[in-house]
Image (cartoon, helix red, strand yellow):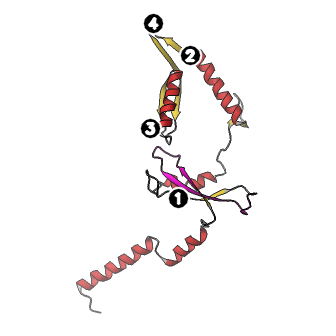
Amino acid sequence: MDVSRRKFFKICAGGMAGTTVAALGFAPKMALAETRNYKLLRAKETRNTCSYCAVGCGLLMYSMAGDGSGNVKSSIFHIEGDPDHPVSRGALCPKGAGSLDYIHSESRLTYPEYRAPGSDKWQRISWNDALTRIARLMKDDRDANFVEKNEHNVTVNRWLTTGMLCASAASNENGALTNKFVRSLGILGVDNQARV
């Protein structure tokens, strides 16, 4: 077989194009297998925001009850990026794309737990008990450590023994309200998950 230089480059380019198309997922068998697995037509679509970092990418979560009668609790079975979201335009990082594994993880904590001092066991408590305990501990610490005036008798109203870590996926309005609330208590140590 007599192959000229030009024919050799054509053969190489054609082979490279074919393997690239197959590597990108355009092989017919792979595409058919993936479309068969997702039953998105009967699913409930819910828009949400990814909670992993400060970017706030949009998620589309698909859930479906087991028998469609409403007697079975809905379960999320597919998550993808929201192409209409102004921040991410459908793109997700590996953590956001793996959100489904996080949701269905056996080690995911879905309720508050408390471990008494000196104990080696965690006990489940109600949300009301958890919030009441947090509020009580904050009040006790603020009462014990609040500084009204500094050494020059200038009013400072500081509470330096407690800090606040704010959510990164919150809106600007929510962040402003959280900042005002924390500052009104006298807390100076305020940070955001986006920086951590």
Where residue 192 appears, as percent x and y from the top left, is 47, 35
Q: Work out how far the residue at label 3 is from the one at label 4, CA to CA, in angstroms.
A: 35 Å
Sort mark 4 into few (<14), some (14-19) or many (20+) by Cα contacts within 10 Å: few
In the image, residue 171 sits, relative to residue 94, either above or below, namely above
For the N terminus, give its image quadrant.
Answer: bottom left
Q: CA distance from mark 3 to mark 1?
A: 26 Å
Query: Disc 4 designates what residue?
Result: 153
Q: Determine whether label 4 and label 2 are within 8 Å by CB.
A: no
Disc 2: which residue: 145
Q: Amino acid at mark 2?
A: Asn
| Marks 3 and 1, the one that precedes in the sequence | 1
Dot 4 amino acid type: Asn
Magenta residues, start to end: 46-71
Q: Circle 1 sits in a helix, a strand or a loop, which is it?
A: strand
Q: Nearer the viewer, mark 3 or mark 4?
A: 4
Q: Could you say which quadrant of the image residue 18 lies in?
A: bottom left
Seen as rendered, the residue at the extreme bottom is 1
Q: Position of residue 150 (x, y in %)?
A: 46, 10
Residue 80 circle label: 1
Distance (Cα) linking label 3 and label 2: 27 Å
Q: What residue is shown with label 3?
A: 195
